[in-house]
C-alpha cells in the first residue's frame, strides 16, 4: 500500500484534535469526536478526523490509524491504533465482533413499544447520485446484509425518549435506519425522517452519541472507555426532561 502523504495542519487544528483525547497509551489513542467532524472522506476544504491524526505522528512515522468510523454528526468515542501490530490486532477483534458499543439517542414521538427489545432487520445500500442511504429490505434481497440492534429506554417524556442502543453488527447508518423502521427516528436525523423540532425545542443536528466502547486491548485484557455527550445534546436532554 502506498504510504499517505502527511497533511499540514494549522496550530488551531492541532490544538483541537489534542483537546479531544480521552485515553492514550503506547498502543492506542481514543478520542471524543465532536459532531460535525467527518471521520474520513469528507468533502470540501475542512480536514477530516483521519487527517487531523497527523498531529500525533512522530517525525518520519505514520499517523495513528482509525479502527472504526462514526457518522459526521454522531459524537463520541472513536478508537485509533498507534502501531501497525495494534491496528492488526484491533481490526481482527472488530471483525470477530469482540467490540461492544453503547450509544445514546433522543427519539420521537416517545418510547418504543416494548420499551426494551431487539431490532433484527436486514439492510441494503441504496445509491442516489453522490448520496448513499441504507434501506430495510427482505432477507432474500440480493444486496441484503444482516443487521441487529438492541435498544433500551432510559427515560421517556412527552413526545420524546432517551434510549441506550447497542449495535450487534456494524452496517452504515444501522441505528438510524433501524429506529426509523420502528417509527422512532432519531431527533435531528433529516435523512431518515427525524424531527427537527421537539416540544418547541429546535434540534440542531442528529442526536446520536457513542457513549461507551469496550474492546480487547492489544496489550491484554479488556478496556472500557466512556465519553459524556456534547453540550448541545445535554441541553436538549434537560430541556425535554429526559435527564
Image: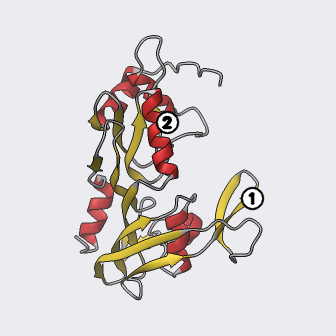
Marks 1 and 2, the one that precedes in the sequence: 2
Q: Residue 111 in the image: x percent, y percent?
A: 37, 82
Q: Is residue 71 left or right of residue 157?
A: right
- Give the secondary structure at mark 1: strand
Expressed as whole percent of the image width and height from the top left, the position of residue 193 reads 55, 72
Q: Relative to residue 147, is residue 157 depicted above or below?
A: below
Asked if 12 appears above or below 35 in the picture, the reply is: above
User: Farthest residue in the bottom direction?
Assistant: 113
The disc label shown at residue 88, or none: 2
Front of the two marks 1 and 2: 2
Q: Residue at horizontal 74%, vertical 58%?
A: 127
Question: What count of labels does the image hold?
Answer: 2
103, 236: nearer the viewer: 103
Pointer 1: residues within 10 angstroms few (<14), some, or many (20+)?
A: few
Q: Residue at x 36, y 78 (%)?
A: 160
Would residue 191 be seen by someone viewing this image from the given angle? yes
Residue 8 image position (x, y, % from top left): 49, 18
Does 219 appear above or below 240?
above
**Residue 68 visible from this viewpoint:** no
Quadrant occupied by the C terminus? bottom left
Between 193 and 229, the residue placed more toward the observer is 229
Q: Nearer the viewer, residue 99 or 233?
A: 99
Give the number of the disc on residue 128: 1
Residue 229 in percent (x, y) is at 30, 55
Which of the pair 232/97 is nearer the observer? 97
Q: Residue furthest top?
A: 60
Amino acid at each position: 500500500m502506498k504510504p499517505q502523504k502527511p497533511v499540514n495542519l494549522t496550530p488551531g487544528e492541532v490544538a483541537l484534535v489534542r483537546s479531544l483525547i480521552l485515553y492514550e497509551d503506547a498502543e492506542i489513542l481514543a478520542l471524543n469526536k465532536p459532531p460535525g467532524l467527518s471521520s474520513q472522506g469528507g468533502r470540501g476544504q475542512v480536514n477530516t478526523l483521519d487527517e487531523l491524526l497527523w498531529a500525533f505522528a512522530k517525525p518520519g512515522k505514520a499517523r495513528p490509524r482509525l479502527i472504526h468510523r462514526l457518522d459526521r454528526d454522531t459524537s463520541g468515542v472513536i478508537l485509533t491504533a498507534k502501531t501497525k501490530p495494534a491496528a492488526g490486532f484491533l481490526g481482527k477483534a472488530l471483525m470477530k465482533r469482540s467490540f461492544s458499543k453503547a450509544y445514546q439517542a433522543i427519539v420521537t414521538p416517545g418510547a418504543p413499544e416494548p420499551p426494551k427489545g431487539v431490532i433484527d432487520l436486514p439492510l441494503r445500500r441504496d445509491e442516489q447520485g453522490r448520496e448513499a442511504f441504507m434501506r430495510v429490505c427482505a432477507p432474500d434481497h440480493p444486496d441484503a446484509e444482516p443487521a441487529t440492534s438492541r435498544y433500551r429506554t432510559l427515560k421517556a417524556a412527552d413526545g420524546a425518549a432517551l434510549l441506550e442502543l447497542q449495535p450487534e453488527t456494524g452496517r452504515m447508518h444501522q441505528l438510524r435506519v433501524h429506529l426509523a423502521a420502528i417509527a422512532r427516528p432519531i431527533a435531528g436525523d433529516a435523512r431518515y425522517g427525524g424531527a427537527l423540532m421537539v416540544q418547541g425545542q429546535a434540534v440542531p443536528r442528529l442526536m446520536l452519541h457513542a457513549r461507551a466502547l469496550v474492546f480487547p486491548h492489544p496489550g491484554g485484557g479488556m478496556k472500557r472507555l466512556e465519553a459524556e455527550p456534547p453540550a448541545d445534546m445535554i441541553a436538549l436532554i434537560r430541556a425535554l426532561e429526559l435527564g
